[in-house]
């Protein structure tokens, strides 16, 4: 993921903002004024951040060949994805019943 994991994390969090706000991603990106690399990742899956989003989406869809063909090792992707699921579970638990 490079030396800026927080940027990848932010891209992941923002990647569903369009669905959450019921707005096209282009409108969301324009309104919140993101950096060019983050905008490119969210709108067109460009650059290293876009590659991270494509890999996360491949995990969600269980399209393993896309992960195997990526620049990251499948073991590293698997561990990052499992850690993200654990983190999500901890956050959800801390919020209590919804």
Image (spheres, grey):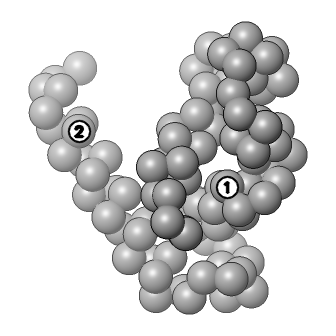
Q: Position of residue 37 (x, y in %)?
A: 75, 45
- Read off the residue under disc 1: 49
In the image: residue 69, left or right of residue 61: right
Identify the image quadrant of residue 74.
Answer: bottom right
Q: How far apart are marks 2 and 1 (CA)?
A: 23 Å
Q: Which residue is drawn at 52% across and 41% down?
A: 10
Most foreground residue, 49 or 60: 49
Q: Which residue is drawn at 78% across and 37% down?
A: 36
Q: Does 12 appear above or below 63?
A: above
In the image: residue 89, left or right of residue 76: left
CB under 8 Å between discs 2 and 1? no
Q: Residue at x 58, y 21 (%)?
A: 20
**Residue 91 image label:** 2
Identify the image quadrant of residue 51.
Answer: bottom right
- Determine if residue 65 is in view: no
Q: Residues within 10 Å of mark 2 (few under 14, many from 20)?
A: few
Q: Position of residue 67 (x, y in %)?
A: 66, 79
**Residue 6 image label:** none
Q: Is mark 1 on a helix, strand or loop?
A: helix
- Closer to the N terminus: mark 2 or mark 1? 1
In the image: residue 5, left or right of residue 42: left
Q: Does 50 appear above or below 34?
A: below
Q: Where is residue 95 in the image (x, y as percent from the top left)?
A: 18, 26
The nearer-to-camera label among 2 and 1 is 1
Looking at the figure, which quarter contains the C terminus? top left
Most foreground residue, 17 or 89: 17
Q: How crowded is mark 1: few (under 14 residues within 10 Å), some or many (20 or more)?
A: many
Most foreground residue, 28 or 66: 28
Q: Which residue is drawn at 59% across and 43% down?
A: 11
Q: Is mark 2 on a helix, strand or loop?
A: helix
Most foreground residue, 82 or 36: 36
Q: Does 63 appear above or below 88?
A: below
């Amino acid at each position: 993921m490079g030396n800026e994991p927080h940027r990848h994390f932010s891209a992941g969090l923002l990647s569903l903002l369009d669905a959450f706000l019921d707005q096209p991603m282009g409108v969301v990106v324009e309104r919140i004024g993101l950096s060019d690399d983050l905008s490119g990742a969210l709108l067109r899956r460009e650059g290293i951040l876009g590659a991270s989003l494509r890999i996360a989406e491949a995990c969600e869809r269980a399209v393993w060949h896309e992960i195997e063909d990526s620049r990251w090792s499948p073991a590293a992707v698997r561990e990052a994805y499992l850690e993200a699921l654990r983190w999500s579970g901890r956050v959800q638990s801390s919020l209590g019943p919804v």
